Image (cartoon, rainbow, N blue to C red):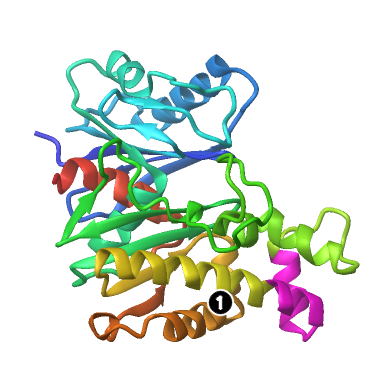
Amino acid sequence: MTDLVLAVDIGGTKIAGALVDRGGAVRREVRVATPTDHPERTWRAVVDVVEQVLRGEPVAGVGIACAGPVDAAAGTASPINVPAWRGFPLRDRVCELLPGVPVELAGDGACMALGEHWLGAGRGSRFMVGLVVSTGVGGGLVLDGRPFGGRSGNAGHIGHVVVEPGGEPCSCGGRGCAETVAGGPRLVAWARRQGWQGPENADAAHLAAAASVGEELPRAAFERAGRAVGLAIAAAAALCDLDLAVVGGGVAQAGDLLLGPVRRTVAEHCGLSYLGGLRVEPARLGGLAGLVGAAALVLRPG
């Protein structure tokens, strides 16, 4: 009996796959760009990744992390950043591809949280939220040491906590969500509106580089984003009685530019006695967190 599982992590910019063993070690990783213009092209890219990773090798199960929303019960995915997929029957398609192999599906934020809880910054925590601050802001919950997906599998989607009532429109249909402030493209757009003259194709990494050498507007953008993330964490912590928030994702690679204001905001807004031990820590698994968490759906169920 093999001790390997297939982990797949599907996002708006990349599809990753890997073999993961029972200790969480990632082997034979493959990544490709995500085609988002046609449902079958996106699916074909998933198939290509699976075939390159497996090379005919048997696996004990498949864990899938997918950008959300997902419907874990129905096994479908409708990622906001993959417009070609709406109610796409992802779990059934993977079951058809690998007959007889158990398949588990969860949101990518939930898998990031689960991966960090298993082998990363969340080890030993009982009540944590994991955040992915990247193009958008995703997240997942681990409550009483177990992943908590809620009714549909989307619990912990902290990017849609409102931090600026009446603020910028969000892809979810609301306004002022944390994602509208801290998501990478929104971060850069805000800085440009304030007059920042960065490269034409600038992303959050360019903004972070400018902030790190003291440019005022980029630093202000990260201060604003960190405050938004901190407010969202404070709300989630008060609601779920958390002891830890783990912050990862591409924007979070800016380090203390983001985490500094996150921590200050959390300290300012978490005055209740039961939140006194709440910590904010950077993620440790980097881009592997989603794959490790997807594998954990099979290797560490419930």
Residue 135 percent across, percent down from the top left:
61, 51
| Residue 120 visible within the image | no
Foreground of the two, 30 or 261: 261
Q: Residue at x 73, y 78 (%)?
A: 220
Q: Main secondary structure of the magenta part?
A: helix
Neighbour tally class for label 1: few under 14, some 14-19, many 20 plus, Cα within 10 Å: few
- Relative side of 134 to 278, left or right: right
Q: Helix, strand, or loop for circle 1?
A: loop
Q: Is residue 158 magenta?
A: no
Q: Is residue 63 above or below residue 219?
A: above
| Residue 22 visible within the image | yes
- Relative side of 180 to 101, left or right: right
Q: Is residue 12 above or below residue 188?
A: above
Foreground of the two, 32 or 245: 245
Residue 255 percent across, percent down from the top left:
56, 77
Q: Residue at x 77, y 62 (%)?
A: 190
> Image quadrant for the N terminus?
top left
Q: Is residue 72 above or below residue 206?
A: above
Range drawn in magenta:
205-221
Q: Which residue is mark 1?
A: 255
Residue that lies at the very extreme toward the left in this rendered image: 1
Q: Is residue 2 above or below residue 210?
A: above
Foreground of the two, 128 or 268: 268
User: Which amino acid, by three-letter code, is at mark 1?
Assistant: Gly
Residue 287 percent across, percent down from the top left:
46, 56
Q: Residue at x 57, y 60 (%)?
A: 250
Residue 277 percent across, percent down from the top left:
27, 84
Residue that lies at the very extreme toward the front in this rendered image: 166
